Image: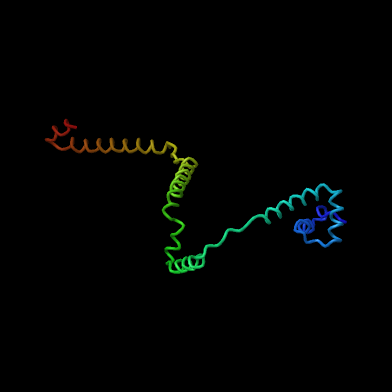
Amino acid sequence: MNCPMESHNPEMLVAYAAGQLNQEALAAFEKHLSGCPACSATAADQMAVWQALDVWEAPSVPSDFDRRLYSRIGAEQRLTWWERLARPFHPLMLRRILPLTATAALLLMAGLILERPAAVAPATKGAESVRAEQVERTLDDLELLGQFSAARPGTQEYRDAM
């Protein structure tokens, strides 16, 4: 007999544990189990599962199960699309989801801010020269205005005020 574990044939082990093997296959498999520790361990595990399933009893169904089931199905069909969409956001769920969402949003914003700091424009010499040129032009204009006021007679007091 080929080893079910080596030939990847677990159906033989399950059939043995379920008691579904005929007498001939059962005798051959039990002979194999005596010499194969891997199969005997797996068969023992399967037997334990089958024994536990034999002992387990399903809980009884309440007598009004069908009525309650159909009333829930009817209530589900009467819901509007908006109610179906909003149901996952039930207030109890909001108490858990809203703080987590807000925390995730804050972490994302902080990450974006730290990843891209504000760009600082480097100081250029052009900006300083423009200011110096503006001051120079203004002084030239004031000198020109002073020359006009000096050329007019009787405007001495205006020239002194400057």
Q: Which image quarter holds the C terminus?
A: top left
Residue 88, compared with residue 70, is above or below; it is above
68 vs 53, left or right, is: left
In percent of the image, x 84 and y 49: which residue is there? 36
Q: Nearer the viewer, residue 27 or 12?
A: 27
Residue 44, compared with residue 142, is above or below; it is below
**Residue 16: x and y, percent?**
78, 57
143 vs 29, left or right, is: left
Q: Nearer the viewer, residue 6 or 141?
A: 6
8 vs 88, left or right, is: right
48 vs 84, left or right, is: right
In percent of the image, x 43 and y 66: which residue is there? 79
**Residue 35: x and y, percent?**
86, 48
Residue lying farthest to the top in this orientation: 160
In percent of the image, x 72 and y 51: which residue is there? 48
> Which colour style is shown?
rainbow
Q: Nearer the viewer, residue 155 or 109?
A: 109
**Residue 94: x and y, percent?**
43, 51
User: How many discs appear?
Assistant: 0
Residue lying farthest to the left in this orientation: 154
Q: Which image quarter holds the N terminus?
A: bottom right
**Residue 153: x and y, percent?**
13, 36
Q: Nearer the viewer, residue 81 or 138?
A: 81
